[in-house]
């Protein structure tokens, strides 16, 4: 290998990045779930989902940024392995869908003054998309491409 | 005594089957993570509210009281999945320094919750009435943030400690695993999750 990724020269780099990845996940998915639960009538009910979203969006975005950048670094440690890992590919499909959904349909449903009739459907879709990201992420460690590459 | 309990529980039919299953184990781990994302986020937001850094438009009483029930459900989900995972490899976990640290941190969490229960968690409305959030509430929140973050990191660390193969009985067939010829073989320290697929009893 011509280029050595410094991440691979330290045994601690990968697990420490994973910790950042998990804390970022707790902030981003956690705050999104708070809004989703509120749309479903669970949790904080004294305020509207719109108000909750206004109060948490910065934490959501911050968590997403931490999760994304730690994730890119984790990916960089062994890109061809991830590329061949179907759990990783599924995770990326869920992740891109979840982010697009969050900043389009979800945001519209949350911020409208009168909750649209499909509010609960949007909340469930959001929760399931993010759960899909988590499942994909965990399964990465359990899948082997079974190919000798690199 | 703890060790013999660990050895006994991991060889019960239930945990033996769980350890050997290629799919159920990662599903439980994923649900553990879903619990962390959904329940951990509520802990973080409650702590940050007490510190005055987030959700300041909501009263402390609303945040503390209304998150209480969903947080308990989240804890139930996360803890159940955690116990299922630990039980299936109880002997290995017994020797695992990160698992031991995690249990100690749980004990400290329980102690801090008890210590601060009356002054912070039992009567959050009183916190709203004082002109600024009292110091002990902020201390409780800061400790909670630190402890729960450390618990999550310890949990991630568990997978990085190689079990003492000469002492554990539920052997994981690392040597014969195709994994070692795969692309990750170059970085064997990068977690052992994948070896579980080929776990043997």
Image: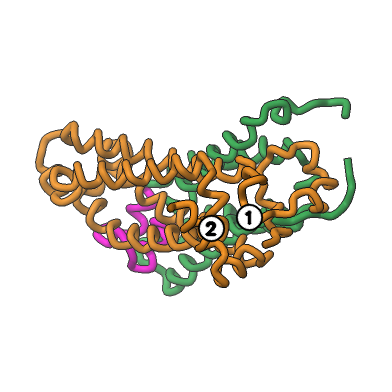
Chain colours: A green, B orange
**Residue reaching furthest to the bottom:** A117
Residue A146, horizontal then vertical, whole percent: 84, 55
- The residue that disc 2 covers is B7
Q: Which mark is residue B169?
A: 1
- The front one of A138 and A51 is A138
Disc 1 is placed on an element classified as loop
Of the numbered discs in the image, which one, if any, rests on residue B192?
none
Q: Are marks 2 and 1 in contact (CB under 8 Å)?
A: yes
Residue A102 seen in this snapshot: yes
Chain label for disc 1: B
Q: Residue at x 33, y 45 (%)?
A: B107
**Local crowd size for mark 2, using a 10 Å CA cut-off: few (<14), some (14–19), many (≥20):** many
Q: Is residue B22 above or below residue A150?
A: below
Write the start and end of the magenta stretch as one range: A33-55
In the picture, the quarter occupied by the N terminus of chain A is top right
- Asked if residue A105 can be seen in this view, the reply is no
């Amino acid at each position: 290998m011509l280029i050595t990724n410094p991440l691979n020269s330290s045994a601690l780099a990968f697990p420490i990045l994973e910790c950042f990845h998990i804390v970022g996940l707790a902030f981003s998915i956690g705050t999104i779930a708070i809004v989703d639960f509120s749309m479903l009538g669970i949790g904080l009910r004294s305020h509207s989902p719109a108000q909750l979203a206004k109060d948490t969006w910065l934490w959501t975005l911050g968590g997403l940024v931490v999760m994304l950048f730690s994730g890119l670094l984790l990916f960089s440690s062994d890109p061809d392995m991830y590329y061949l890992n179907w759990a990783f590919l599924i995770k990326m499909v869920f992740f891109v869908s979840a982010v697009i959904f969050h900043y389009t349909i979800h945001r519209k449903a949350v911020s409208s003054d009168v909750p649209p009739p499909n509010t609960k459907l949007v909340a469930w879709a959001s929760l399931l998309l993010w759960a899909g990201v988590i499942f994909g992420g965990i399964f990465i460690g359990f899948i082997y491409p079974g190919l000798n590459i690199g | 005594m703890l060790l013999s309990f660990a050895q006994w529980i991991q060889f019960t039919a239930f945990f033996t089957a769980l350890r050997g299953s290629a799919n159920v184990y990662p599903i439980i781990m994923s649900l553990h993570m879903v619990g962390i994302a959904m329940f951990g986020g509520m802990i973080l937001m409650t702590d940050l509210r007490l510190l005055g850094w987030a959700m300041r438009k909501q009263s402390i009483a609303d945040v503390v009281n209304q998150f209480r029930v969903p947080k308990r459900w989240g804890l139930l989900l996360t803890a159940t999945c955690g116990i299922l995972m630990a039980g299936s490899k109880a002997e290995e976990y017994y020797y695992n320094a990160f698992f031991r640290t995690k249990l100690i941190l749980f004990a400290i969490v329980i102690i801090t919750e008890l210590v601060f229960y009356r002054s912070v968690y039992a009567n959050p409305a009183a916190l709203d009435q004082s002109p600024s959030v009292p110091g002990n509430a902020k201390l409780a929140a800061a400790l909670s943030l630190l402890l729960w973050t450390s618990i999550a990191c310890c949990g991630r660390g568990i997978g990085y400690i190689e079990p003492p193969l000469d002492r554990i009985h539920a052997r994981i067939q690392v040597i014969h695993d195709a994994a070692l010829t795969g692309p990750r073989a170059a970085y064997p320290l990068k977690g052992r999750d994948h070896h579980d697929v080929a776990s043997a009893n």
